[in-house]
């Protein structure tokens, strides 16, 4: 989860992240026809960027909005069932603020519902006497100093305040408060809280009631960003679970982790748990240390001879290779840098099991380190890209506009490029978590996944290089440069191509790489040819495809350039005989 500073630095930046992928997930049809909506055109002004942030799959609610919705629901139930507002509030709380569930249960068995929530059908009044005995302190008080719930059990004001205060201090359970009489189950509603509780307790009760409306509601969740007080109401059936709060934090509504599409929530949960667990520490210990033969404490040997002395108080001296006492070693066993006993035992298979465990631990550790380092690197790169985008919007865009004598509305292609970089870094980061859990035995899928990931990553690196390094030349210039329009064409082209690569990657991962079977029998574009695709331009500034290809998951074979065509949508190189792209099924 991003820090407060990171999130506020990204105000007006990251809120468009969710809109890169909107629509269905692509798993419902054979064509994977998801509308991913990567940024596909240059925005003309800042108002257009703002309009892109309007959520299609969720509604962002402030505290005022939540209270208003809560009041509307209470009033609706109160009107339909002809019951007091406090009773309607108790019913809604019992049914997790679902109006339809309240109606269904109430009209199915009103008596059962009343008994379950403590709403008596007939209100019992206190005895009509000058003085009544308090059921808690057992003192007598005038009738006007006593209060009771709908059951009529009288208690004095001081005892009521103490009872309510203790219940509220215990937490949200106070929302289902019952009469203090042990034998009574009558509900104590907000009407009595407002009359009998202190101002501080009334405020706490009100906060608990507000939180209950969000936390017990199946369609609402609090934004998980630190310090954020907005709630998010999800629009069911909208496809993507990625939502963006008004605080600019993107998260998955389903699992409340940071936005992780196209990786599913189960994979994300396993990955986060693995990053926090101690399992990799144990793997490191198994792979890089051996236990002292006497005290069993793990010891790491990073240099020197085979003579090891354990730390005090053990101080046991032993051979690193065979773990035998050093007193039994010397020149006759190989000296300080070898051990004949170990070599003999190894040939006889005495150390096979321990070596096998060490090797397995080492391989597991190396695999995890490989994927985790790249996952963390892309996360850091994304934070840096967000900061660079913020700087571009607030400072550099105006400077570039003055330097190149062009209005800012003509420079929005630069903002589009940075928005693409930020989003693609997020997607690329989670593909490494996906790759870690991809089964090793599924060689075709792994090969296809690594191919798509490599294409997307190399395209992103070129885009990032162009937006960061090549743009700096024009920022440092002392006046307008004649080749700025060429730079505009190049950056816009790289943005478009990178978007296509990531559309392919997202579509493939969300459908479980289901196209591997058909793709393995077809000729597909090689990584080198696609790399050339991004780098080569014709005179008009258009990016053109190179003509080499190789088979993926099938024996390699060469095709003449004239027998290939490059897809305009995803840049995939296809045999001339096909009419539809083998990658995205786009018809030429």
Image (cartoon, grey):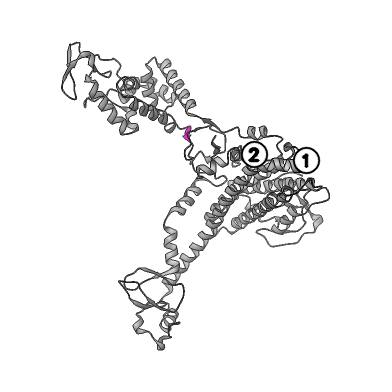
- Residue 228, visible in the rendered structure: yes
Q: Nearer the viewer, mark 2 or mark 1?
A: 1
- Magenta stretch, residue numbers: 218-223
Q: Position of residue 270 (x, y in %)?
A: 47, 50
Q: Residue sitting at 42 percent across and 54 percent down?
A: 277
442, 156: nearer the viewer: 156
Q: Is residue 154 left or right of residue 541?
A: left
| Crowdedness near tag 2: few (<14), some (14–19) or many (≥20) residues, C-alpha within 10 Å | some
Question: Label 1: which residue?
Answer: 405
As drawn, which residue projects farthest toward the right? 539
Q: CA distance from mark 2 to mark 1?
A: 37 Å
Residue 526 position in % (x across, y down): 70, 58
User: Which disc, if any, is residue 324?
Assistant: none
The residue nearer to you, when weighing 21 against 41, is 41
Report which residue position mark 2 lands on.
Answer: 35
Q: Residue at x 41, y 71 (%)?
A: 354
Of 8 and 554, which appears nearest the observer? 8
């Amino acid at each position: 989860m991003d820090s407060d500073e990171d999130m506020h630095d990204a105000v007006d930046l990251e809120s468009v992240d969710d809109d890169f992928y909107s629509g269905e997930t692509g798993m419902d049809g054979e064509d994977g026809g998801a509308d991913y909506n990567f940024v596909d055109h240059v925005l003309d002004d800042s108002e257009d960027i703002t309009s892109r942030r309007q959520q299609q799959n969720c509604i962002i609610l402030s505290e005022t909005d939540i209270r208003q919705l809560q009041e509307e629901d209470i009033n609706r139930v109160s009107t339909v069932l002809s019951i007091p507002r406090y009773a309607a509030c108790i019913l809604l709380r019992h049914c997790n603020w679902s109006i339809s569930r309240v109606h269904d249960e109430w009209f199915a068995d009103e008596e059962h519902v009343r008994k379950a929530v403590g709403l008596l059908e007939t209100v019992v009044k206190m005895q009509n006497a000058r003085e009544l005995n308090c059921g808690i302190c057992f003192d007598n008080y005038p009738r006007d100093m006593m209060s009771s719930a709908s059951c009529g059990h009288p208690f004095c004001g001081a005892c009521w305040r103490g009872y309510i205060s203790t219940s509220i201090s215990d937490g949200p359970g106070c929302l289902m408060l019952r009469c203090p009489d042990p034998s009574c189950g009558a509900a104590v509603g907000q009407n009595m809280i407002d009359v009998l509780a202190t101002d501080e307790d009334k405020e706490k009760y009100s906060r608990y009631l507000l939180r209950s409306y969000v936390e017990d509601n199946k369609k609402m969740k609090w934004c998980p960003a630190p310090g954020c007080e907005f709630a998010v109401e999800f629009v069911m059936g909208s496809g993507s679970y990625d939502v963006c709060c008004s605080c600019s934090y993107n998260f998955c509504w389903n699992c409340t982790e940071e936005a992780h599409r196209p990786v599913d929530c189960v994979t994300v949960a396993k990955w986060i748990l693995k990053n926090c667990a101690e399992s990799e520490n144990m793997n490191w210990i198994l792979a890089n240390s051996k236990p002292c033969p006497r005290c069993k404490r793990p010891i790491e040997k990073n240099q020197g001879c085979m003579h090891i002395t354990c730390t005090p108080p053990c101080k046991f001296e032993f051979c690193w290779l065979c773990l035998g006492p050093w007193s039994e070693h010397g020149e006759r066993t190989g000296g300080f840098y070898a051990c004949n006993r170990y070599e003999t035992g190894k040939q006889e298979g005495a150390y096979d099991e321990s070596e096998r465990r060490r090797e397995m631990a080492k391989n597991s550790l190396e695999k995890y380190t490989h994927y985790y380092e790249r996952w963390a690197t892309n996360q850091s790169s994304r934070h840096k890209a967000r900061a660079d985008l913020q700087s571009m919007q607030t400072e550099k865009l105006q400077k570039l506009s003055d330097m190149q004598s062009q209005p800012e509305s003509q420079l929005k292609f630069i903002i589009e490029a940075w928005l693409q970089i930020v989003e693609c870094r997020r997607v690329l980061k989670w593909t490494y978590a996906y790759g870690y859990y991809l089964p090793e035995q599924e060689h075709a899928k792994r090969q296809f996944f690594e191919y798509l990931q490599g294409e997307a990553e190399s395209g992103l690196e070129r885009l990032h290089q162009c937006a960061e390094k090549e743009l700096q030349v024009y920022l440092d210039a002392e006046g307008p440069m004649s080749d700025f329009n060429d730079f505009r064409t190049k950056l816009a082209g790289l943005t478009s191509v990178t978007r296509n690569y990531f559309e392919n990657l997202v579509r493939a991962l969300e459908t479980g790489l289901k196209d591997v079977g058909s793709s393995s029998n077809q000729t597909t574009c090689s990584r080198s040819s696609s790399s050339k695709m991004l780098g080569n331009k014709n005179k008009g500034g258009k990016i053109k495809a190179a003509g080499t290809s190789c088979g993926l998951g099938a024996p390699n074979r060469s095709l003449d350039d004239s027998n290939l065509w490059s897809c305009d949508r995803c840049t995939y190189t296809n045999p001339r005989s096909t009419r539809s792209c083998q990658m995205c099924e786009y018809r030429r």
